[in-house]
Image: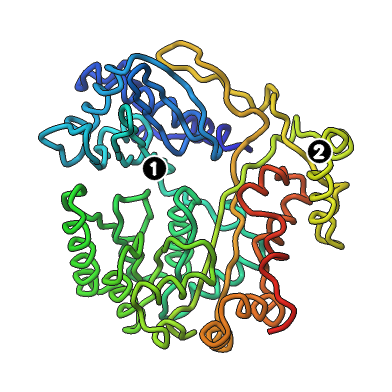
Amino acid sequence: MSELQEAGQDEKNRGPKERIIHLKDLADVSESEKKVLSYFETARKLGASDIHFLISESIFKVRMRIFGELQTVDEDQPALGYSLCATAILSMADVTETSFFPQREQDARLSPQLMRKIGIFGARYSHRPTGDGLIAVMRLIPDDGDKVPTFKQLGFIPEQIRLLNIMLRRPEGKIVLSGPTGSGKSTTLRSACRVYLDDNQGRHLLTIEDPLEGQILGATQTPIICDKSDEDAVKLAWSRAISSAMRLDPDAIMEGEMRDLISMMSTTYAAQTGHIVLTTLHTNSALGIPERMITMGMNADLICDAQLLIGMISQRLVPTLCPSCRIPWETRAPELRDDERDYLERHCNKDSLCSTDNIWFRNPHGCSECNHDVIINGRKRGEIGKGLTGRTVIAEVIEPDNRLFQILKTRGKVAARKYWLENMKGISRVEHLLRRINEGLVDPLEADRIIPLDEDERLSIDDV
C-alpha cells in the first residue's frame, strides 16, 4: 500500500476524538490563516514532507517535497507570499513573534493545537532572505497517533532488525543515528523508542525534542522551550534540558539531536551512568559518527568504547516504484545511454544479490494507481506521483566491538570499514539497496543519485 493510500485509510479509521476538522468549519481562524492551513491540508493528503514558499520580485511559488522530489503546486502574487509568511510567524506560532522580519532569518514552531485540527501533529517554520525575495520552508510532522511504524515497515532488513533489537536490550550505552536532513531519522528514533518500551515494561523513557516529533505512547515527551531565533538561548536550553532529565529518574533518554560539544558530553555522561541514550548526529556514514564526535572535541579514547557507543546507524530514503506501471529492464535498456547501461550492468549484476534481469524503472508518466490530483482551494493544480508510491529506508547498522574501534583509531575509517564488512559480516547500504533493486522496488538510476551504486568499490582497499 502506498503512503497516499495509507494516509487515506488512516483518515477513514480515525475515531470520533481524532476526526479531522475541515477548513470550512474553522470559525476561529482568519482567512489568511485558512490559506496557510489549506496548503498544509493539501501537503498532508499528498504525503509531502515539506512546503516551500519561494517569493521573488515577480512571483510567489508554492512547492512541496513529495517522495523526496520538489514539485510546484501553486503560483500567485509576491504580496500574498509575504502576507502568508507574516501570518505564520505572527499568529500561528506557539510562541508568537512581535514582528515579521523578511530581511533576516526567523524560525518558529507552528501551534500544535492548530495543526492537529487538520490532522498534522506539528510543523516547523524557517525563513531566510534571498537575493530578490524570501524563501520559507515548513517541515510537516505527520500525526499517525500512536501507530509508530515498525523497523520492517520503514525498510530495514532482517539482519539489521536483529542488531537493532540487540542494541535496545543493552542495559546502557549510546545509540547514534546519522543521515542528512529529511532522511527519516526522527521516525526511526520513534520506532526504536517503541521497541524499547515494548520490550522493557516498567521502564521510564524520557524524550527531549525540538519540537515534539509525534506521539510515543508510554514515553514522557518534553519539548525545548526558548527563543528559537537566539542560537545561544537554544544551546543553553538543550544543555539545561539534558541536565534536568537526569534528575527525572529515566531508564532511557531520547535526545532529538546532538547539536554541539555540550550535548555530546551530556549524552555521553548519561550513557556512562547506566542509561540507554538514543540520539542523532549529522554525518554522512555510520563510521563517520565517532570521527565527527572527535572533531567536535570529544576524547577519542572515551568515544571509541564498545561499552559506551553501542550502536551506529546511517540511513537514507529512496523512492519506491509503482508496481502497476514500472518499466522492466528489457523495455528500458535499449533507451539508456551506453554509459548508463554499462554502469548498471557492472554494478547490478552481483552473483545471487542482484541481476539486471530483475531491474525495473520508473514510469515518468505514472498511471491511475500512482498519479494523484493536486487540489488547491478547490482548483486542480496538477498531478503528483508519476510512477512513485513512497520511500523506503536504506541503511547501514553497526554494533561495534573494540577491535573495530582500535582499527578506526590507528588505521582510519577505510580500514575499519573493511574490517566491519569482512570480519563482522556487515551489510553496506549499497548491498541493502541492491536487494531492493533486485526485488523491483527501487529504480537503480533514481537511487544512484542518493546512494551511488559504486560506493563500495570506491571506498574499498586491498588489505587492512
Name which quarter of the figure residue 23 lies in: top left
- Label 1 element class: strand
Q: Residue at x 58, y 88 (%)?
A: 403
- Position of residue 36 measured from the top left corner of the image (x, y, whole percent): 31, 24
Instruction: Please tell me in which quadrant of the rendered image residue 276 appears.
Output: bottom left
Is the residue 160 above or below the residue 275 in the image?
above
Three-letter code for the amino acid on which mark 1 is drawn? Ile
Q: Does 460 sit left or right of 100 as displayed?
A: right
User: In the figure, is residue 144 to the left or right of 207?
Assistant: right
Farthest-out residue, top: 379
Q: Is residue 281 rendered to the left or right of residue 228? A: right
Against 53, residue 417 (above or below) is: below
- Of labels 1 and 2, earlier in sequence is 1
Q: Quadrant of the C terminus?
A: bottom right
Q: Residue at x 62, y 42 (%)?
A: 319
Q: Quick one: quadrant of the N terminus?
A: top right
Instruction: Check the image and report above or below for 238 versus 36.
Output: below
Instruction: Say whether marks 1 and 2 touch (CB < 8 Å).
Output: no
**Helix, strand or loop under label 2:** loop
Q: Is residue 254 left or right of residue 64?
A: left
Q: Residues within 10 Å of mark 2 (few under 14, many from 20)?
A: few
**Residue type at tag 2:** Arg
Distance in Å between CA atoms under marks 1 and 2:
40 Å
For this rendering, which residue is in front, 200 or 455?
455
For image coordinates 76% across by 38% down, the residue present is 361
Which of the 4 image quarters holds residue 87? Answer: top left
Instruction: Kindly identify which residue carries mark 2.
Output: 337
Q: Nearer the viewer, residue 250 or 257?
A: 257
Closer-to-camera residue (238/247): 238
Residue tagged 1:
141
Pointer 1 local density, CA inside 10 Å: few below 14, some 14–19, many at least 20: many
| Place of residue 75 in the rendered image (x, y in percent of width and height, measured from the top left) | 42, 17
